[in-house]
Image: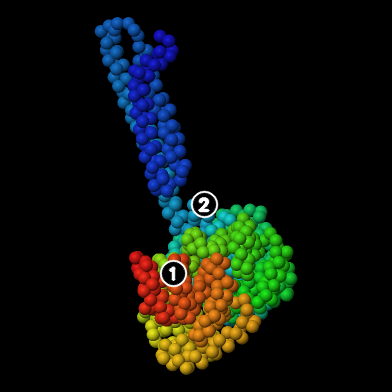
Amino acid sequence: MSGLRRLIVEAHRRSLWQVLLIYVGAAWACFELIDAVTERLGLPAWLPGLAIVLFLLGLPFVVATACVRDEIGPLTEERPSPEAASVEAEREATRRQRRLLTWRNAAASFVVALAVWGVAAFGWLVLGEARSERGDDAGARPAVAALPFVNLSGREEDAYFTDGIHGEILTQLQKIGGLKVISRTSVVGYRDSPKNARQIGSELNAGYLLEGEILRAADQVRVNVQLIDARTDEHLWAEIYDHEMSIESLLDVQGEIARQIALALRTELTPEERARIEARPTDNMEAYQAYLRGQYFMDLPHFTEDDLNRALEEFERAVELDSAFALAHAELALAQAQKVYYWVDASQRQRDLATRTAQRAARVAPESPDVQLALGLYHLWLNRDPERALEEIDRAAENLPDRKRVLVARTAVYEVQGKFEEAMDLCREALELSPRDASIHTSIASYNWLLRRYEQAEAEAEQAMTLAPDQMWPRLYKAFIIWSDRGADDESEAILDALPHENPWVRWARYWQRMSQDRYTDALDVLSESESEWIRLKTWARPHALLAAWAYRAMGQADRASQLFEEARLALLRELETQAEDPRYHSSLGLAYAELGQTERALREGERAVELLPRSTDAFYGIPYLLDQAAISAMVGDEDIALDQIEHLLTIPSWVSRMWLEGDFRFDTLRESPRFQALLDQYPQPASN
């Protein structure tokens, strides 16, 4: 018998074909099941491959078992004798035992392969849960949250220094690509928090917490820091740094803390990361402190014009002390551009000043991603130039480890462009990096408000209020959303009355709330609470005389109203002598002219405001002037034009809604118009509300 034929006969005799067929078939069926389970459970893609390897490793063991020769000897082709029959029976019994052993070993190999795979999958799931608890992402990056540092001196003037060092250490950590660093805006709410490490780590999705204390006394500074495992409350690393108050020592301490945290978390630094950490923004201690003070004022949650001016003063001092301080130049350019963007000072002199500062920052550090990001926002805020802004932001994104800052910057660009859906997508992405950032939830609330998704908008505002109970803007937005959704009511009034009354936004909102409810005396009381004669916002600039005149007119005191409308007209003309390009004053002047019966001038001023800031240039801040223009048209009796303008506002993303129009007293002359009522019926409140 030939060798091949004998091999085939032996394979058949030992049932090898059946064993292999069943083993391979069962393995394939299990592989299909494993592949489906892997995807459903979010297991790593290499686990199905591991199953194939294990099944293949079991196959030789099964074949070897089947091919083991028995000790009785080879079969013969002779006719068996009676004695041989007994031998043959023994051989048959041996073959049955061998087949049983083969089947048993095949099953054992199969079970072992499945068991090994199951242990691997279970281990991955358990480790994955641990990674989730510890805040590690799919790339196994340890997640670190640096909680607000404690100012041990207790002096208010040292608060900026403590917060500044905290922010700088965060910045250093963000330069390490192997770490996931929770943003500052997510951790500020944990100042003096009674929650334990596990609670904070779980809420921030951070596996590790950095705590710190800073004591500043005369020319000495002590920095006490400790790294804690949030899951076990175990101290992984701690150090106390006592140094002379010098720029070298401060920057060295910040870099050393970043390096030690990376070491404690077994994160290897690349040469580029080491270089970024060791880089010194300035060698001037006074300039550095001025820079920290400027950042402190810019980061205050209730940002005001006074805070902006104080930040400007500090950044100006920083660049005076060190003309090569690129980051200070960049922050100064941003603050100067914000003055223009928010109409604090939109003069050509201010624009030229911001341009020179930005150019200086670009010359000093053209390759700095921080400078590039600042230049992107500078182009947006100074000239509302989204293309140039995105160009710089994209350049910065290539080398800036802090991706959250990039996302927020792009969101600002999309907001100006009116891409509110895209802006919300970026906000949600940013929330993955900064899960407890109230400002991001507030932005999402505002975009949903403009898109008339009031239920979602209110939920986001409430989430922001929960995360930042002391911040004003989430509450203001909730009140605005209520106005658009169901009109001014007791809830919106309670929200507004709980806010600081001296804030211009709150004063305007409380006035509007009362006017919308026909409570004119109460509206006048709101104005009398302030010594100011103006409410200047980034959307409108209204003299108190104009606002009071509306209340007196509604109460039937026409003479007093006319007198105040004239006072408002004169005040607005004076402002326009120096702010001729500011649409806020043109818009308000158009309203005053309309109330005084000067139709042509009223329409011209309203149109001029829209020309200065059309919605095509700024999809958010262009809305107020379209609304004022519609009000002017209604006041002067141009009903068809007014209704066309109202219909336009109802079809684009805006806060204008049926309930908003019903509460806006400036459209009272249109109430009896059939077309006005038809518009309200055509554009009802969203069904979800």
Taking the spot 52% from the left edge, 69% from the top edge, the residue there is 620
Taking the spot 36% from the left edge, 74% from the top edge, the residue there is 674
The residue that disc 2 covers is 139
Taking the spot 55% from the left edge, 69% from the top edge, the residue there is 614
Judge from the rendering whether residue 320 lies leftward or rightward of residue 553; answer left or right.
right
The image shows residue 287, relative to residue 178, as above or below, that is below
Judge from the rendering whether residue 85 lies leftward or rightward of residue 390; answer left or right.
left
The residue that disc 1 covers is 647
Tell me the crowding category of disc 1: few under 14, some 14 to 19, or many 20 or more residues within 10 angstroms, Cα based: some
x%, y% of residue 142? 52, 57
Q: Are marks 2 and 1 in contact (CB under 8 Å)?
A: no
Q: Quadrant of the N terminus?
A: top left
x%, y% of residue 423? 50, 62
Q: Quadrant of the C terminus?
A: bottom left
**Residue 291 or residue 70, whichever sits in front:** 291
Q: Disc 2 and disc 1: Cα gap in Å?
A: 51 Å
Kind of residue indicated by mark 2: Gly
Judge from the rendering whether residue 566 lies leftward or rightward of residue 396; answer left or right.
left
Residue 326 placement: quadrant: bottom right
Taking the spot 44% from the left edge, 90% from the top edge, the residue there is 552
The answer to whether residue 558 is seen in the rendering is: yes
**Residue 568 or residue 542, whichever sits in front:** 568
As helix, strand or loop, the secondary structure at mark 1 comes to helix
Residue 68 placement: quadrant: top left
Mark 2 and mark 1 lie on one chain; the one further toward the N terminus is: 2
x%, y% of residue 675? 38, 72
